[in-house]
Amino acid sequence: MAILINENTRVLVQGITGKEGAFHTKQMLAYGTKVVAGVTPGKGGQRVEDVPVFNTVEAAVKETGANASVIFVPAPFACDAIYEAVDAGIKLIVCITEGIPTLDMMKVKRYLEGHPEVVVIGPNCPGLICPPFKCKMGIMPGHIHTPGPIGVISRSGTLTYEVDYQLTLAGLGQTTCIGIGGDQIPGTNFIDLLKLFNEDEETKGVVMVGEIGGTAEEEAAEWIKANFKKPVVAFIAGRTAPPGKRMGHAGAIISGGQGTAESKMAALRAAGIFVAEDLGTLGQTVKEVMGL
Amino acid sequence: MKVHEYQAKELFEQFGIPIPEGKLANSCEEVMAAIEELGLPVVIKAQIQAGGRGKAGGVKLAKTKEEAQEIAKNMLGKPLVTHQTGGQGKIVRKVLVEKAADIKKEYYVGMVIDRAQRKPVIMVSPAGGMEIEELAQEKPELIFKEPIDPFLGLLPFQARKLSFKAEMPVREAAKILTSLYKLFIAKDCSLAEINPLILTSEGNLLAIDAKLNFDDSALYRHPDVKEMLDPLELDPLEYEAMKYHLNYVRLDGNVGIMVNGAGLAMATMDVIKLAGAEPANFLDVGGGANVEMITQGFKILLSDPNVKLIFINIFGGILRCDVLAQGVIEAAKQVEINIPVLVRLEGTNVEKGRQMLNESGLNFIVAKDISEAAKKIVETLGTKE
């Protein structure tokens, strides 16, 4: 039916009493997400949207059976929040926070090597949404999504909404949409999620939204060619971006001749993947290319 | 964030990386005073934040006072064009005057974050002086790399191994590599380069050049680094945007864009180009934008004389469409808008946002989706010209 999420997903919000945390807790609940707990150190005992707040993730998990966490903690404290969630046994962690220093995230990734069962989505991402289970762990507008056969993986936030909405308007809909984030070192990459979509029966095809910087798309292209059983449509943002300039996302920079949109599009095409050029008609393109 | 060579060398000194004796000079008089202190010969180095200074005539040896005077006069206050500056070049406002060193051998030392490996990687090469990209193309076998475990740091054996491979004096070189690693981590660098690191005829190692870039996300914990920012190195509009935490990059086209989200902003630039027009900028107002940020962003777009049309493309998530609408309306009250503004809104609180724009009495062109927006951009620009 979907990846990462199922009917037993019980969501914890770290940083629930902050402005964004509180706003999006309301939105997540309204979408149908089972938000069972929140954590803000020192604010245990309060309630946000009637969700109980705890001082520690450990206590939240013990009291409510929370098994997935979405993090709205400011950048200087966000990695600590990730460590705390892992320590409390949470297996799915979605970090929305933008602006985490690269060296801090590098340590998180190193730490996660010792916890292969844990999936960290983000940081600097919109999170993930699973329309079939009415579960949203993130900040995307819920109403633009509808259950359907497409999986979406994207390095972007709002560009993902654009794609998701077009899939909805095209009458397709989504199994799970994941924004992996725009930082240099994401917790989860395209290939990690493609592996899951490969095994998900309901997902009939995947849309991959990449952008300039790094080589994640090139690596994914190779992996898809060798392993992926379903059709993929890719879109790459930043064809008009100049080299050496950071385009908003910490990871979106062409440096040393590496990370251009051309290189990514060429690698994807060489792997037999359809690369859409026109964002305005992407939904229709997916429908035609995948024959759905 | 980038810094000048002389600033990078200040940090090198703090971390025990040997640098030539030198003085910063803002004028010909200061250059001459530096020479009194350092003696001759000296190397005079233009302080601009771009690579390729040597080839472009921005690094010169002066053997006499007359030569130094002539070099300083021709360098200070003049633009220097390198392959990285663009055609107009960058004005040289400061020069670094350094005691000339006797170069016996040149090496390359660099450190970056390897995104695919998710680790810092330290690189050395006995073929110093060349740019690393060039070296990677022409003599990749002469670049030696060691990935560093973030939990362990650069281990002594790795520093030794690299020094042996690059045929550097091992004890001294290993110390420099370790110091560079410590600096990289302590100051949250994204790039550190010594190119060249030289061996002098006395047998000492010396960092002749220094380049450091810093992780913008980590500047909050490095006020000393943040202070090194030279606003004169930035485009004035980019600097203005930075003050309001707006992600803005100036480009050459005539369609100004304001978008929430970096990916959508890049894609919006691409859409404009595909439709046959040219984007004037990248502007991501971000997820947490408030009314003031939107207002300032809008003002920045309007102050670019090349901009003939503004395209606001918002897919509301964290940033709610009503906040965007309010910001645009506020901006319109503060500055006169005499170019067409095309708006496309979707997402959180979209109805409220659209209603606010409709009721504002301001004249916006509205597009319901990206395809329609692309058409309207070309139509509007076409009829105006």
Image: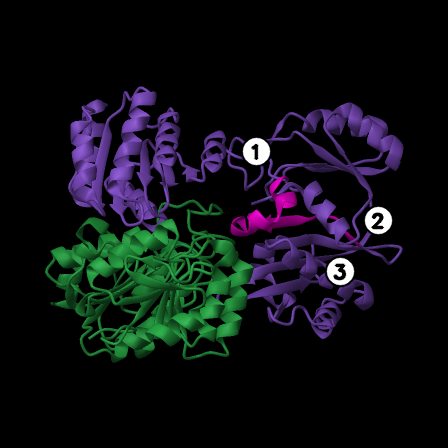
Chain colours: A green, B purple
What's the magenta region?
B206-227
Q: Nearer the viewer, residue B303 or B164?
A: B303
Q: Earlier in the sequence, mark 2 or mark 1?
A: 2
Q: Which quadrant of the rendered structure holds the C terminus of chain A?
A: bottom left
Q: Residue at x 14, y 58 (%)?
A: A168
Q: Position of residue B358 (x, y in %)?
A: 16, 30
User: In x, y percent, where is residue B297?
Assistant: 37, 33
Classify 10 Å Cα crowding around label 3: few (below 14), some (14-19), many (20 and above): many
Q: Which residue is mark 2?
A: B102
**Residue at (82% x, 43% y) in the render:** B21
| Image-based side of B55 in relation to B283, left or right | right
Camera-near label (1 vs 3) is: 1
Name the amino acid type tagged 2: Asp
The subunit letter for the residue under badge 1 reads B
Secondary structure of the residue carrying tag 2 is loop
Marker disc for residue B231: 1
Tag 3: amino acid: Ile
